[in-house]
Amino acid sequence: MFDNPSHATRRARQGILREWRLFALSIFSLTVAFVCLGAALLVMTNLRAIETRWTHAGRVSVFLKESATDAEIEKTKVALEATAGVSHVTYVTSEAARDEYAKNEGNANDPLLALPKEAFSPTLEVDVDPNLDDKGIEDMEAKLGQLQAVESVETYRTWTNRLARLVRGGVAASGLLSLVVFASVLAVVGSTIRLALQRRKTEIEVLKLVGATDAYIKRPFLLEGSAQGAAGATGAVLLLGVLFLLVRGRMDGELTTLLGVEPTFLPWFAVVGMVVTGALLGTIAASLGLRKLVAV
Amino acid sequence: MAYDDDFDGSGDRREGGAFRPMLRQGKRFSQEAAHRPILVFEDVFKSYRAGRPVLRGANLVIERGEFAFVTGPSGAGKSTLLRMLYRAENADEGRILFMGKDIARLKDDSIPFLRRNIGVVFQQFKLVENWSVFENVAVTLEVLRLPEKLVRTRVGEALERVGLSGRGEEPARVLSGGEQQRVAIARAIVGEPALILADEPTGNLDPQLAIDILGLFEEIHEQGTTVLFATHDRTLLEQRPHRIIVLDEGKITDVRRGLVTEDGNFLSAPLH
């Protein structure tokens, strides 16, 4: 048997309007809690994008020995170009390497520029298919290491491994933060509902006296709890959105170039997930707060 | 058939003028039950503290369509007796039969369905002050999931019966005490219950208003509703020759003809 849902919605709406200060305070508290969670998710989203970008950087630097002859270098270059997953190979001489460093550094007084050109190793810069997996790159690194002319191979995996560790740490921290946020949502909504229950004691007594079932009495409070949770999460998403636009507007373009990725906002499923989680947590909190209805 | 399956908020309330209680879906009202007393107390015991019982083996029969006063000194158990009828309290021992069913043995989830057959009026009115008069009365029918149009019609009729026609939009808090009590009565009668329980309904009203309110309950009674009217106001008891149930020290004394004797005089005993 179902009670008329429109009665529950109307009573929930009336309850929120009558106790709007109480609910506004609760929603503000929930917004603050969800902003913390949302900010952590936002950082994680961008760190993961950087990690993905660098994991699939599509670049390998092959440092050549000083003793490597032009013939050896050419042979290595040709062999590399014939390797599956390699799209282009560029030979960078010691001189070109120093010039590029000078160009990027832009400081003529840099002591490194005073070093002889031999201090800058010649390299073969290899453009790799971004979709080449870790195993493919590992194989290429192993094979290159065995060549006579090759001093060392840099696949930039050290960076991506560090980044991956940072992301894993961030995920764990976000998980803990989620628990704290969930607990605070339960506490805030539960307290608000208990207070609303106390303020509407007569209403509940009347409903019980005229034969309302517990489910009928509880339904508006559950809707109110759900609305609070959803509104708190929505408020947090909106606030984060505004902050994100402000920060992105002031972000240095060179930083974006350096990181290789544009800063991105939370994906739509994370936004929907936050709002749905807020609504669900609000309902659960209200349900817990309603365990002891007024006895008549 | 288990007792606690019998009460419900659905179903046709009246058929050919005979009372039909609200039963749970799929349950049928026995015509035999229509001839039983509406209320029977059988050796009912109730105490809040050990050795100080409020009711000690109370026995009482209320017939369908009766009007009875329940009286006695403060603390005699008038309110307790009424509260047991709508299961705000439960009896320690004995049986309380409402329309033939033992309500002392109802499961908790059946209590709302019992209450849909009983209207209750209190001394303190128990209105939701920030609701309108209409909302305070309509709540009884909304719980029954009746269509909005029917709710409007029946609330309008109930407000007319209590003399508050056209006052539905006013907030309950702006009404006088007498008017608030009329709203509470409208709320109790709008669902056409089998039994109306009035727990000191005139306790907060001046003597003239009290008599007006008593008159209102009598009008409701004349429509066929059973009324139990708890009061310790002797002047009210002297007004009408209704049956009086006196509670004192846990025992019930039944004064079937009220305080008015056949020659028009008033009895003094056994009231305090």
Image (cartoon, helix red, strand yellow):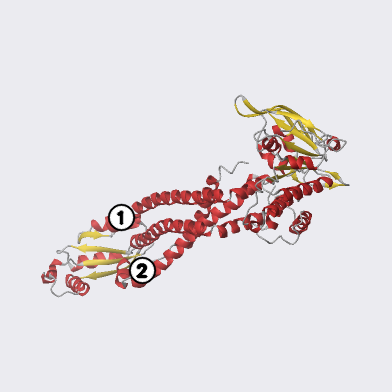
- Closer to the camera in the image, A240 or A287: A287
Select label 1 or label 2 by which is in front. Answer: 2
| Residue B256 found in image quarter | top right
What is the C-alpha distance between the residues marked 1 and 2? 27 Å
Q: Nearer the viewer, residue A168 or A101?
A: A168
Mark closer to the chain start, 1 or 2: 1
Q: Is residue A79 left or right of residue A204?
A: left
Q: Which residue is mark 1?
A: A161
Q: Which one is nearer the viewer's eye here, A32 or A237?
A: A32
Residue beneath label 2, please? A247
Q: Where residue A118 sits in the image (x, y, percent)?
A: 13, 68
Please provide percent x and percent y for residue A143: 27, 56
Compared to residue B92, the image places residue A228 above or below, namely below
The amino acid pointed to by label 1 is Asn
Can residue A187 be seen in the rendering of this structure?
yes
Residue sitting farthest toward the top: B51
Q: Residue at x 58, y 56 (%)?
A: A15
Respond whether the residues carrying marks 1 and 2 are from the same subunit. yes
Q: Is residue A150 left or right of residue B102?
A: left
Left or right: where does residue A118 sit relative to residue B227? left
Label 1 Cα neighbours within 10 Å, binned few <14 / some 14-19 / many ≥20: some
* Mark 1: secondary structure: helix
